[in-house]
């Protein structure tokens, strides 16, 4: 693999983009470490998605698919994509530089940088090492952390690593950066509309407005081949769609049941259920999958407390039916989707805004959901609320965990501005989108190649490939 020359477009300055409460700085650490850092969590957040997208309704027509197959069946509105000007290195460079500039963070104040991605450019060199060029001018080369890879779960492992570092005796008082992002690209066919592209960056440190909740996290891991990439000469994965959906739901059921039991013990309440969760953010390969996950919340809550009047409509038919039957029983699934409709509307749907508009960002997916929530719900309404996340990566690895909002999130919301930024993209006709996919397939792993994509298709401040 040859090195790629990366450049970036000019960033338009905006006097209102500065961090209103001043810059975010590292915390001086003295010799006395008897007091551990408090309220460790997300201090700042940014998201990057390409300027180009394709409308899913138009793609349905172009593909000759039935009306609503992508928009209703998958729950998708648009799909982001990149041409040959961008790769995983460029999008991660873009999102990190954007966060650091918007929030006024000094590169010298970063002591750890973790990257979660499954988009591999080089079989040896990490994406994190590429990002270190952003630190060169500051002279800061003492930055721990590296890449984590396991399908869509890498970003979550990166987040856990960053939080664990700050809460450990190894912490030196500086902040951590977590980057989660991917290019989700499929061969032509039924899976292609579930693609997407984007990256999320999170600044992790103490005294954060969005803090990790301890004692409730539950993880499920097992060995299977539902989605994998054995051909390193291709961007395309091998997917067993039915197995992947079932594995997602099985992992979800295990994680939710374990999580809610731990939450029950922590809160000392009998029959803890989804009412203890204010907002739910699920990994979204396509948004309809998250709606199914919410239905499984109702299934498990029903099994734990079958007398709850919320489940009057399904009690007689499903009291003695195991949850696992729903993996193949569509009638049962639809019954619980109907029962959980209000839960989905009030607790989960807001977090799916970016996913509907971007598609699957793999490692960045669940954090794009969190960004959607923080961007759209006011700080006053979020204060004191519990946000529960479910992260899933094929193969498989999954965790359910939660944040609690303890401070002002208005600055994060203003810098994210997800609704406004998504509205500023360019819709590309499906025929041109297909040409871009053909171009990427033909030029993948080419050496001594000069990309041909138009720079007009990039947002200001975007890093791009000049030569490979």
Image (cartoon, helix red, strand yellow):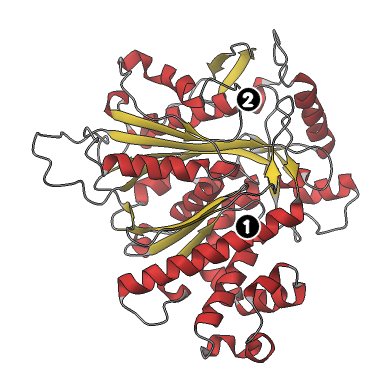
Mark 2 Cα within 10 Å, few/some/many (few <14, many 20+)? many
Q: Residue at x 78, y 34 (%)?
A: 433
- Percent of width and height locating residue 372: 51, 52
- Please, which residue is most extreme toward the right here? 64
Q: Is residue 361 left or right of residue 170?
A: right
- Percent of width and height locating residue 417: 48, 45
Mark 1 Cα within 10 Å, few/some/many (few <14, many 20+)? many
Q: Does the image show residue 421?
A: no
Q: Residue at x 21, y 50 (%)?
A: 38
- Percent of width and height locating residue 324: 66, 71
Q: Secondary structure at mark 2?
A: loop
Which of the 4 image quadrants contains residue 45? top left
Q: Quadrant of the N terminus?
A: top right
Residue 248: mark: 1
- Percent of width and height locating residue 84: 70, 22
Q: Is residue 213 left or right of residue 398?
A: left
Q: Is residue 339 left or right of residue 114?
A: right
Residue 19: mark: none
Q: Secondary structure at mark 1?
A: helix
Q: Does the image show residue 184?
A: yes
Residue 86: mark: 2
Nearest the viewer among 292 and 10 is 292
């Amino acid at each position: 693999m040859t090195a790629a020359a990366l450049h970036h477009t000019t960033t338009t300055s905006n006097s209102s983009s500065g961090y209103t409460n001043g810059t975010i700085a590292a915390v001086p650490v003295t010799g006395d470490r008897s007091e551990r850092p408090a309220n460790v969590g997300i201090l700042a957040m940014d998201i990057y998605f390409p300027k180009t997208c394709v409308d899913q309704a138009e793609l349905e027509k172009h593909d000759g698919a039935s009306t609503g197959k992508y928009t209703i069946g998958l729950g998708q509105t648009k799909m982001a994509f990149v041409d040959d000007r961008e790769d995983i290195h460029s999008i991660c460079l873009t999102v990190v530089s954007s966060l650091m500039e918007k929030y006024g963070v000094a590169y010298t104040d970063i002591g750890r940088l973790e990257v979660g991605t499954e988009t591999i450019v080089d079989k040896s060199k990490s994406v994190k090492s590429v990002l270190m060029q952003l630190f060169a001018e500051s002279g800061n080369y003492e930055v721990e952390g590296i890449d984590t890879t396991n399908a869509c779960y890498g970003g979550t492992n990166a987040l856990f690593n960053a939080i664990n570092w700050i809460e450990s005796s190894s912490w030196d008082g500086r902040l951590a950066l977590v980057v989660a992002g991917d290019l989700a690209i499929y061969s032509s066919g039924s899976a292609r509309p579930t693609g997407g592209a984007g990256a999320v960056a999170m600044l992790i440190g103490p005294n954060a407005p969005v803090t990790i909740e301890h004692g409730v996290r539950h993880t499920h891991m097992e060995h299977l081949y539902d989605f994998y990439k054995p051909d390193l000469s291709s961007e395309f994965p091998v997917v067993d769609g039915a197995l992947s959906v079932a594995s997602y739901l099985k992992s979800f059921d295990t994680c939710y049941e374990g999580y809610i039991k731990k939450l029950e013990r922590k809160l000392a309440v009998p029959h803890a259920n989804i009412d203890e969760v204010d907002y739910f953010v699920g990994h979204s390969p396509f948004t309809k999958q998250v709606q199914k996950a919410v239905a499984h919340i109702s299934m498990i809550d029903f099994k734990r407390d079958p007398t709850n009047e919320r489940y009057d409509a399904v009690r007689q038919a499903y009291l003695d039916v195991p949850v696992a039957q729903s993996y193949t029983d569509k009638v049962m699934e639809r019954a619980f989707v109907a029962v959980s409709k209000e839960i989905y509307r009030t607790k989960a749907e807001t977090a799916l805004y970016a996913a509907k508009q971007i598609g699957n960002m793999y490692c960045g997916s669940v954090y794009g959901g969190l960004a959607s929530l923080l961007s759209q719900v006011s700080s006053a309404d979020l204060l004191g609320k519990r946000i529960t996340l479910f992260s899933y990566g094929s193969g498989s690895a999954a965790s359910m965990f939660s944040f609690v909002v303890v401070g002002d999130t208005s600055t994060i919301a203003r810098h994210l501005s997800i609704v406004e930024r998504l509205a500023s993209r360019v819709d590309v006709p499906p025929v041109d989108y297909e040409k871009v996919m053909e171009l990427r397939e033909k030029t993948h792993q080419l050496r001594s190649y000069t990309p041909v994509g138009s720079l007009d298709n990039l947002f200001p401040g975007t890093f791009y490939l000049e030569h490979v």
